[in-house]
Amino acid sequence: MNELLLVQELKNGNSKAFTQMVEAYQHMVFNTVLSMVQHHHEAEDLAQEVFVQVYQSIHTFRGEAKLSTWLYRIAVTKALDWQRKQKAKKRINALKNIIGLGVKEEQLPDFHHPGIQLDKKEQAAVLFKAMQQLPDNQRIAFILIKTEGLTYEQAGDVLNVSVKAVEALMHRAKENLRKILTNYYVSQL
């Protein structure tokens, strides 16, 4: 089914079209969210939330961008919202520790991304941790291009910026990652 017909069927409430859309885009959405939040269980929940939002708001999709671009935007927004909530929780827990309520920081689980080969897992974990230190727009551009394999034009559509802006974001992201990783590896010596 072509994209225009799929969108029309989704707008008509066709459950088979929705199932087809989920099957076609579930890995893309999950991997994008996982690359950002780095928690497998949370990524599964957020990916489900993306599809629930699509189901509830498909009537607002105007078709000015590809369906996949719209899905990326929703996935990125959901992941960023989750990260903001996590940062707020950490600040509250830090405050509780200061006033003596004794709340301990959560231990982060090992990060596993389906696209990472086992022998590269340690290096990937270091890279993904470094990526978390990038500003949101740089991190998202880097994830979309390097992890998801989007072109600069496609990433620009998702981020709603020009190709030149994506090029600048990628340049800054690479420079910042180079600094972060250099500091990390120097400190490991």
Image (cartoon, helix red, strand yellow):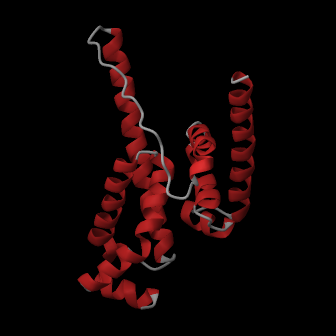
Along the horizontal axis of the image, is 35 left or right of 41? right
The N terminus is located in which quarter? bottom left
The quadrant where residue 186 appears: top right
Q: Nearer the viewer, residue 84 or 120?
A: 120
Q: Count of labels shown?
A: 0
The quadrant where residue 176 appears: top right
The C terminus is located in which quarter? top right
**Residue 74 seen anywhere in this rendered image of the structure:** yes
Is 119 placed above or below 2 here? above
Along the horizontal axis of the image, is 4 left or right of 46? right
Residue depicted at 74% across the width and 60% down the height? 164
Is 26 placed above or below 86 here? below
Q: Nearer the viewer, residue 19 or 161?
A: 19
Image position, residue 133 (x, y; %)? 58, 36
Residue depicted at 28% across the width and 71% down the height? 55
Image position, residue 112 (x, y; %)? 48, 48
**Residue 76 seen anywhere in this rendered image of the structure:** no
Along the horizontal axis of the image, is 64 left or right of 124? left
Is 166 placed above or below 3 here? above
Residue depicted at 48% across the width and 43% down the height? 111
Residue depicted at 46% across the width and 80% down the height? 63
Image position, residue 25 (x, y; %)? 43, 72
Q: Nearer the viewer, residue 110 or 2?
A: 110
The quadrant where residue 183 appears: top right
Is 109 placed above or below 115 here? above
Residue at the extreme front of the image, as rendered: 119
Image position, residue 97 (x, y; %)? 34, 13
